[in-house]
Image (cartoon, rainbow, N blue to C red):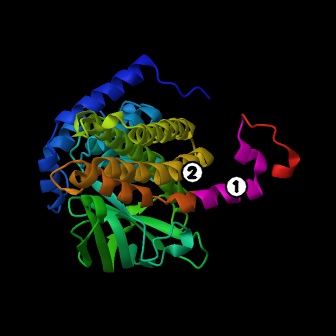
């Protein structure tokens, strides 16, 4: 697979990095962390006007039908600038979920408004266990007349306070994958929201559904047959969250190299010391490996769960390496890195949050080990090495 960038993709990345570096200050980012929305609506509108909110949507819905690699470049740049935004909740989760499984009316209602930056949507999937398997879903959906009734509690719902609708997953049968998706207005009677404390300042919410009733046209896809779409949502989320982690790692390295060149100790800049050289080289090595894995993962995304091997490789690596990069960056900086007025602390907490989203490193290593056990050829991929028999 050729995962090098062409000139248009390089220009896109440069444009996105420049935008993210100049659109808001660290002080403004800190202010937004204290708000319920968690992001600046005017900045989100600018992101949409750049065409990034609808990048993966078909032209008929206001999109540009860009590749997943190109969106990953944008996500990386926004992560590098630590720009809070509802791209994950509105586009990567809800928007692409509706594109996968929504009815024509649902797509026409929401996708053009997402692409233009006029609508915020989100999904409510995870529950108290935090698990990503279908059996972890305990919220119940029962038929009631011409509609459905929802009962249960969802956690880690992104941007719920500003979303006009929440796409909620609930159980409709006894089998593990008997799961249904419904579109619920954020102001529906019986739905209550509570802000959850979150590392990195992300706007995460607990959503409690107490006999919330919706009509039959709220159904997304087929009743009791939504798990495949949810699994694809999680796969895409892991791929693009890996891209965000790469952006976090790049910002941490840039801050560290600049500091090492300017901070003087023992008669000169600390960057002249071999130990600092080694640390920066290790960050750079892991950053480049992670970036290539992310590009490979994004390029591999296709129909269904295509690319799951590549996504798990990327998320496992990024979830380990990029938080470690921020810790090494703190060691080189010393005490100044722990001040909230210095931006490195922003990236440290964002790395912690991002490594856990859509499955941490341990989860994705288990996915890979299960693939190796059940489908060795699939695990090896198309360009496999001929290893000695005793390795497998």
The magenta stretch spans residue 241: no
Quarter of the image for residue 216 reads: bottom left
41 lies above or below 220:
above
Between 138 and 78, the one lying in front of the other is 78
Residue at 15%, 62% in the rendered image:
34
Between 143 and 325, the one lying in front of the other is 325
The reply to whether dot 1 and dot 2 touch (C-beta < 8 Å) is yes
The residue carrying mark 2 is: 312
Quarter of the image for residue 345 reads: bottom left
147 to the left or right of 380: left
Residue at 61%, 75% in the rendered image:
175
114 to the left or right of 152: left
The magenta stretch spans residue 366: yes
Residue 70 point in image, percent of width and height: 41, 32
253 lies above or below 65:
below
Residue at 39%, 23% in the rendered image:
10
How far separated are the C-alphas under marks 1 and 2? 10 Å
Residue 54 point in image, percent of width and height: 33, 38
Q: Residues within 10 Å of mark 2 (few under 14, many from 20)?
A: many
Q: Quadrant of the N terminus?
A: top right
Residue at 37%, 37% in the rendered image:
273
Between 5 and 334, the one lying in front of the other is 334
Between 369 and 209, the one lying in front of the other is 369
Residue lying farthest to the front in this orientation = 266
| Residue 54 seen in render | no
Q: Looking at the magenta stretch, what is its main secondary structure?
A: helix
SS assignment at label 1: helix
Quarter of the image for residue 364 reads: bottom right
Q: First in sequence: mark 1 or mark 2?
A: 2
Question: Which disc is residue 371 wearing?
Answer: 1
| Residue 380 seen in render | yes
Q: Which residues are magenta?
A: 365-382
């Amino acid at each position: 697979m050729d995962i090098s960038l062409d000139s248009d993709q390089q220009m896109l990345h440069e444009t996105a990095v420049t935008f993210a570096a100049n659109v808001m200050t660290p002080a403004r980012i800190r202010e937004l962390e204290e708000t319920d929305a968690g992001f600046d609506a005017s900045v989100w509108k600018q992101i949409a006007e750049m065409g990034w909110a609808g990048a993966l949507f078909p032209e008929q819905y206001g999109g540009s039908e860009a590749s997943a690699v190109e969106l990953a470049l944008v996500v990386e740049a926004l992560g590098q600038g630590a720009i809070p935004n509802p791209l994950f909740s509105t586009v990567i989760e809800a928007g692409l979920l509706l594109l996968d499984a929504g009815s024509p009316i649902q797509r026409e209602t929401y996708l053009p408004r997402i692409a233009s930056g006029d609508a915020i949507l989100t999904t409510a999937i995870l529950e108290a266990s935090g698990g990503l398997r279908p059996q972890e879903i305990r919220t119940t959906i029962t038929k009631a007349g011409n509609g459905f009734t929802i009962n249960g509690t969802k956690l880690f719902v992104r941007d719920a306070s500003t979303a006009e609708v929440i796409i909620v997953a609930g159980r409709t049968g006894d089998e593990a994958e008997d799961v249904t998706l419904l579109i619920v207005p954020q102001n529906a009677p019986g739905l209550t929201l509570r802000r959850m404390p979150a590392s990195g300042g992300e706007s995460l919410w607990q959503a409690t559904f107490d006999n919330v009733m919706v009509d039959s046209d709220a159904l997304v896809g087929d009743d009791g047959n939504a798990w495949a779409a949810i699994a694809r949502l999680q796969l895409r989320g892991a791929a693009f969250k890996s891209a965000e982690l790469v952006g976090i790692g790049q910002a941490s390295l840039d801050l560290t190299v600049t500091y090492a060149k300017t901070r003087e100790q023992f008669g000169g800049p600390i960057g002249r010391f071999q130990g600092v050289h080694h640390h920066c080289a290790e960050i750079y090595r892991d950053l480049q490996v992670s970036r290539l894995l992310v590009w490979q993962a994004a390029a591999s995304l296709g129909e269904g769960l295509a690319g799951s091997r590549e996504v798990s490789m990327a998320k496992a690596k990024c979830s380990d390496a990029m938080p470690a990069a921020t810790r090494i960056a703190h060691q080189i900086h010393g005490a100044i890195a722990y001040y909230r007025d210095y931006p490195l602390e922003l990236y440290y907490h964002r790395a912690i949050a991002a490594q856990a989203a859509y499955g941490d490193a341990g989860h994705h290593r288990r996915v890979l080990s299960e693939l190796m056990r059940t489908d060795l050829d699939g695990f090896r991929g198309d360009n496999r090495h001929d290893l000695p028999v005793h390795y497998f």
